Image (cartoon, rainbow, N blue to C red):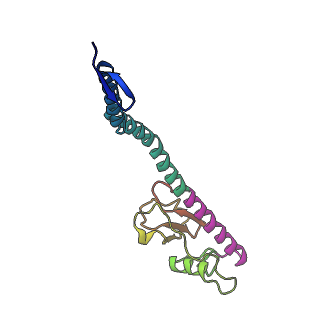
Amino acid sequence: MEMINKTRRGSVAVGQAERKTRRRRRVRRGERNRHAFTLVEILLVVVILGIVAAIVIPQFSHATSEARLNSLLGNLQTVRSQIQLYKVQHHDLLPGQTVIGGDVAAADFVDNLMNDPKYGAYLQRLPVNLYITDRAQRDTVTCVNDVTAGKPTGNEGTGWWFNAATGDFRACSADHIDY
């Protein structure tokens, strides 16, 4: 004869009661373990994040260098257009010249572009060349007065290069002397 135990749900045979208890324990253990991630799941997420980072980071790096180049080109365009405007308004004299074809000193060049008593400032300040590593030299100018001096070498140590003999204004950077 089978033993009968009394439970909250009524009388149950002993064999059936043990089976139900075992089933509840298995379910409870499984639920308790499901609250944590397994090592495989964590490693999978780390690998996926690594792949995404490897794809995205170079794109940001490229965007930064492209932004620096665009800034350089914009600054060159601004200064060149202001030099041309100065030349038109001062009857073919370049900033810093007293006679057409005369020599220009760097201090006079910058002073004439920023402090013109007749027409006002052509530039509020000389822009910085972000390709120059020495921060103190990024907004300085090397002035040359030589028709044969084609373009800067990139070793001048200043941010900008101006040839008064040709009116050529360029960036002083070994990588960007063609701009």
Is 88 covered by the magenta stretch? yes
Q: Residue 168's spot in the image, x, y percent?
A: 59, 64
Nearer to us in this view, 77 or 141: 77
Question: Which quadrant, please, contains the C terminus?
Answer: bottom right
Q: Residue 140's spot in the image, x, y percent?
A: 48, 72
Q: Residue 65's spot in the image, x, y percent?
A: 49, 53
Nearer to us in this view, 164 or 22: 22
Asked if 48 appears above or below 62 in the picture, the reply is above
Asked if 113 appears above or below 27 in the picture, the reply is below
Nearer to us in this view, 86 or 36: 36
Q: What span is colored magenta in the figure? A: 70-93
> Which quarter of the figure has residue 1?
top left
SS majority, magenta: helix
Asked if 2 appears above or below 137 in the picture, the reply is above
Q: Which residue shows up at 64% across the image and 76% down it?
A: 122
Nearer to us in this view, 109 or 26: 26
Number of callouts in the render?
0
Is 42 covered by the magenta stretch? no
